[in-house]
């Protein structure tokens, strides 16, 4: 099952193409510690939360769902811990990680991942984009959101030598989900 | 934007190792707790490296690449592995005097290239193991 999440910039500009405006909303500020609790939180109405990611704020809307997906907090933690804050963060000439691209990646993950999916690790790209990656056994999977380019996905299974590398379009969502479920 | 007309420098031997620093936030854990460089390390449009044969000429060990960056790790890929893709020229770029063995792997990298580099790389200075968890 997928929770319906929508993630936006907490500022004025929203960047989530699949955001559906909730009919009603409850706004509350949630600290990272509150999300870190292992307990599942039940919601009966759409909720809007403010979450810190790499010293910036994003807005999380949960609707049509009773729980926060298990992958969400580990992804936020990974994103925050690995955020490329300053230009040159890779000791070469990397651009700072871009919040709007982080939000774009989170929205792709909310489309793709079942609630109980294995959480990916989030890695910043030198161009200011980010990627989610899973490496388990013989399989490598990536959802890549490069700066200023269409998102992509990558899949490789060393056992079968099957390799896929495509722009991430709606028709690929189920394929990527199946790859992740096979981990 | 002008097209990049730089071509592969064949004076760089196929057997040369190309050294690349890896920051902590671009490490990815393996199932056994060892860490690999994320493919993101190898996706830079102009990927900076140090070229082994130039470092040898200069009497510098590979680890010299980390002198100013003690918190980072150092990996290597083989020039022939890069060239096997046929579209990523390796060039010398030694104009900055502080980087006399500097080179570039040019071109917009495919994910398949970056992941292959991540699978075939060899650590020179390896990061510590992390606790393995799924």
Image (cartoon, coloured by chain):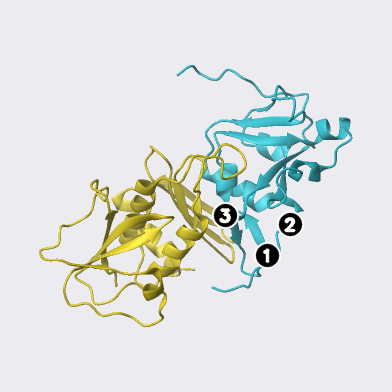
Q: Position of residue A111 (x, y in %)?
A: 30, 60
- Could you say which chain is coloured cyan in the image? B
Q: Is residue B17 left or right of residue A50?
A: right
Q: Which chain is disc 1 placed on?
A: B
Q: Position of residue B6 (x, y in %)?
A: 62, 20
- Could you say which chain is coloured yellow in the image? A
User: Considering only vertical position in the picture, is B5 above or below A122?
Assistant: above
Return the disc, 1 or 2, that comes first in the chain's sequence: 1
Q: Cα distance, mark 3 to mark 1?
A: 15 Å
Which residue is disc 2 drawn over?
B126
Instruction: Give whichever of A101, A173 is nearer the camera.
Output: A101
Q: Are marks 3 and 1 in contact (CB under 8 Å)?
A: no
Q: Secondary structure at mark 3?
A: helix
Q: Are marks 2 and 3 in contact (CB under 8 Å)?
A: no
Q: Secondary structure at mark 2?
A: loop
Q: Which chain is disc 3 placed on?
A: B
Residue depicted at x 69% and y 42%? B20
- For the question of whether residue A71 can be seen, the reply is no
User: Considering only vertical position in the picture, is B47 above or below A157?
Assistant: above
For label 1, the crowd category at 10 Å Cα-Cα, with few meaning under 14, some 14 to 19 and many 20 or more, is some
Q: Is residue A171 left or right of residue B71?
A: left
Q: Quadrant of residue B76?
A: top right
Q: Secondary structure at mark 1?
A: loop
Which residue is disc 1 drawn over?
B34
Q: Position of residue A2 (x, y in %)?
A: 29, 69
* Quadrant, the N terminus of chain A: bottom left
Which residue is disc 3 drawn over?
B25
Residue depicted at x 27% and y 47%? A15
Q: Which chain is disc 2 placed on?
A: B
Q: Are marks 1 and 2 in contact (CB under 8 Å)?
A: yes
């Amino acid at each position: 099952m997928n929770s319906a999440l929508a993630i936006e910039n907490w500022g004025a500009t929203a960047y989530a193409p699949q955001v559906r405006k909730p009919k009603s909303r409850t706004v509350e500020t949630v600290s990272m510690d509150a999300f870190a609790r292992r307990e599942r939180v039940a919601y009966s109405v759409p909720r809007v939360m403010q979450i810190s990611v790499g010293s910036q704020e994003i807005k999380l809307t949960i609707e049509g769902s009773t729980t926060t997906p298990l992958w969400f907090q580990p992804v936020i933690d990974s994103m925050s811990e690995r955020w490329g804050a300053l230009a040159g963060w890779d000791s070469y000439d990397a651009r700072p990680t871009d919040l709007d691209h982080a939000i774009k990646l989170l929205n792709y993950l909310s489309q793709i991942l079942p609630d109980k999916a294995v959480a990916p690790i989030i890695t910043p790209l030198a161009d200011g984009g980010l990627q989610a990656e899973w490496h388990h056994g013989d399989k490598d999977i990536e959802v890549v959101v490069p700066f200023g380019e269409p998102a992509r996905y990558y899949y490789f299974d060393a056992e079968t030598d099957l390799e896929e590398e495509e722009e991430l379009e709606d028709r690929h969502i189920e394929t990527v989900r199946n790859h992740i479920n096979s981990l | 934007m002008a097209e990049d007309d730089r071509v592969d420098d064949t004076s760089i031997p196929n057997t040369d190792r190309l050294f690349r620093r890896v920051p902590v936030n671009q490490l990815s854990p393996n199932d056994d707790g060892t860490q690999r460089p994320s493919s993101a390390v190898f996706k830079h449009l102009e990927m900076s490296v140090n070229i082994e044969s130039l470092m040898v000429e200069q009497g510098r060990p590979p680890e010299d690449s980390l002198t100013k960056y003690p918190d980072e790790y150092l990996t290597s890929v083989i020039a022939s592995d890069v060239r096997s893709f046929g579209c990523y020229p390796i060039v010398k770029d030694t104009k900055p005097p502080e980087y006399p063995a500097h080179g570039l792997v040019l071109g917009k990298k495919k994910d398949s290239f970056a992941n292959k580099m991540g699978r075939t790389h060899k650590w020179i200075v390896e990061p510590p193991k992390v606790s393995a968890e799924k």
